[in-house]
Amino acid sequence: MKRVLFAALLLIFGVGMHSTSVAGPHASIRLYNNAPTRTHFVLPGINGLNCYTADLHVHTMFSDGSVTPDERVKEAWIDGLDIMAITDHIETRRREREMLKFLKGYSPDKSGFEPINTRCSRGVHADERGIVSDLNFSAELALKAAASYPELTIIKGAEISREPVHIGHYCALFTTDNNKIYSTDDAQAIRNARAQGAIITHNHPGWERKSSDYTEFEKKIYAEGLIDGIEVSNGRNFYPEIVRRAVKKKLYMVSATDIHATTASIFGKQNFYRDMTLIFAKDKSEKELRKALLSQKTLGYCGGYIIGEESLLAKFFQASVSATYASSTKKKTSISLTNHTSFDYKLTHNGREIILPAFQTVLVSLSGKKAVFSVENMFHMDTKHPIVELKINK
């Protein structure tokens, strides 16, 4: 009996000691989790349409960016984007020139390879030899990588990049074959993109220019109906006069990073999100995204500012913020303003500044009975702010 009891005690304590003991030395002990986390945007839809976040102007190492297509995809997913367009330059491919030097040993005589038509964005004439490289490759890699990130939709595109002051740069979106876009004729390159069903964004129209006036080339391509949209901001640069052009010409408005480095290196220390275009669409199918863009259902976001057509800005703000009655006297009414979105708002009412952070509520004393505000971090025509009235809920 004693032996049975002793064996039972050994079994109990043995199992217990085994379950809590630590094995011998470890070669590696993980001290933190490095799994990527995705920013989650809460933004309102308008008129039954969803609000999607998009960057429609992005570069990879296959033109003059510093990041591979698969890293661009991961980066966009982390940044919370719903849509990203891969728009590597057709005629400007600095990384290609560098890689040709790196790979010179692969040439038959070990002397290297000649870069062909890789510098046309700076006024170097585009010649008849065309493009040797496969300009579809970067988008194909991005599409393959995006299979691991189902929340992210990739648009295949390309940037037609010619001399910036008189000709300019243009993003072709929804391309089918980037290898068939190139032409020595600047306008014909845009026509070639349109011929395969692409829509065209006029990029950074204020870049390296002293004026936002139309150049002779722009007059030509606008008159021909080749331009569908335009960037109202690019990187940190806002083009106030271009908003007016977009409204007059019925062009969709774009705010884009035009990113070449990593977004973390540019936006990581900022107190706002990366530049993006808000697209109001039924869903993220190509058909619905095209429809949204061509019907000008977009707003731009840049550095905490929201840019676009006045009535669309007003609807977006009214869908973002609610006003609730709190109390009143003979002279004043107090309300609470609640921001239901991921964007901060800066307002003025009767000359007084009101800061309304994301997902916060503030108490506001109205000078009258109407909740009318100037939304200071919204721009429409030129640098004007929309004046918006909120319904006061009781």
Image (tube, rainbow, N blue to C red):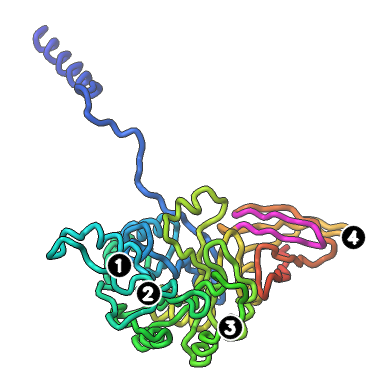
Going by the numbered disc 2, the residue's amino acid type is: Ala
- The answer to whether 51 is drawn above or below residue 353 in the figure is below
Q: Nearer the viewer, mark 2 or mark 4?
A: 2
Placement of the C terminus among the 4 image quadrants: bottom right
Find disc 2 in the rendering and name its residue: 158
Is residue 173 something one can see in this rendering?
A: no
The image shows residue 329 at horizontal and vertical percentages of 87, 57
- The answer to whether 352 is drawn above or below residue 114 in the figure is above
Going by the numbered disc 4, the residue's amino acid type is: Lys
Find disc 4 in the rendering and name its residue: 331
User: 10 Å neighbourhood of mark 2: few (<14), some, or many (≥20)?
Assistant: many
- Specify the segment rendered in magenta: 344-358
| Dot placed on the residue nearer the N-terminal end, 2 or 3 | 2
Find disc 1 in the rendering and name its residue: 138
- Cα separation, mark 2 vs mark 3, equals 23 Å
Q: Helix or strand or loop: what does disc 4 sit on?
A: loop
The image shows residue 142 at horizontal and vertical percentages of 31, 65
| Dot placed on the residue nearer the N-terminal end, 3 or 4 | 3
| Dot placed on the residue nearer the N-terminal end, 2 or 1 | 1
Q: Residue at x 48, y 63 (%)?
A: 257
Specify whether 21 is left or right of 333.
Answer: left
Say the numbered circle drawn on residue 214. Answer: 3
Q: Nearer the viewer, mark 3 or mark 1?
A: 3
Q: Residue at x 61, y 77 (%)?
A: 212
> In the image shown, does 183 or 333 lie closer to the viewer?
183
